[in-house]
Amino acid sequence: MPTDDLPETFHVTTDEQLRAVSNLTRHRIMAVLRFEPATITQIAERVGLAKGSSSYHVRLLERAGLVKVVRTRKVRGVTERYYAMAARSIVLPDPGEGGPDHLMRHAVADLEAAPRDGERHVRMAHLRLTDEQFTELGERLQALADEYRELSDPSLPDASLVFALFHPATREQAEGDAK
């Protein structure tokens, strides 16, 4: 099944789904599957896991509905399954006040694990924006990410883009959380 046939979004709504995406190993497995289907063996090689561990994590993702079998084939009497993402993107629920933002935690872990000698573009900027500018910037960032996702070629090396546009906690809020 080509990724063009996938639904655009999958909304994580259950505790089982949230637990499945909250694990860094499963996050990395989903990254492998984002452009093309792969077998347990291929996933294990790309993520650096034993086949048994890879199989375990894929089963949890499949049970949660995040990945699915898209084709099978017989290899020496054994049925080989190809897994793919259930949708092109996954929408996580708002973590709520004080809740962990799993997406950003995974992004930071992936950044820290990336080769140090590779090209990186990491920047943090503090801005003062009107509500309209804030909304416009968020929409432009989303459109830019969508544009480049459409240009993605599965034969090219992976690149990750993560952005977070938010209003930080006020000093009073931060002090209240520390108590």
Image (cartoon, grey):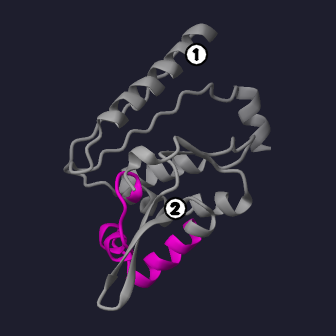
Given residues 62 and 47, the one toward you in this image is 62
Above or below, comparing residue 74 to residue 117 in the picture: below
Q: Residue at x 34, y 91 (%)?
A: 77
Residue 21: % across, % down: 57, 58
Residue 155: % across, % down: 21, 51
Q: Is residue 29 left or right of residue 101?
A: left
* Predominant secondary structure, magenta span: helix
Residue 70: % across, % down: 44, 64
Looking at the image, do the residues carrying marks 2 and 1 touch, with CB atoms under 8 Å apart?
A: no
User: Within the magenta stretch, is there residue 57?
Assistant: yes
The outermost residue toward the bottom is: 77
Q: Is residue 137 left or right of residue 34?
A: right
Q: Residue at x 25, y 44 (%)?
A: 153
Q: In what element is the residue under mark 1?
A: helix
* Quadrant in the rendering for residue 62: bottom right
Q: Which mark is residue 12?
A: none
Query: Can residue 128 be seen from the camera position used here?
Result: no
Above or below, comparing residue 107 to residue 17 in the picture: above
Given residues 173 and 69, the one toward you in this image is 69
Above or below, comparing residue 171 to residue 1 in the picture: above
Q: Residue at x 52, y 44 (%)?
A: 7
Q: Which residues are magenta?
A: 33-61
Q: CA distance from mark 2 to mark 1?
A: 32 Å
Q: Quadrant of the C terminus?
A: top right
User: Which amino acid is tagged 2?
Assistant: Val
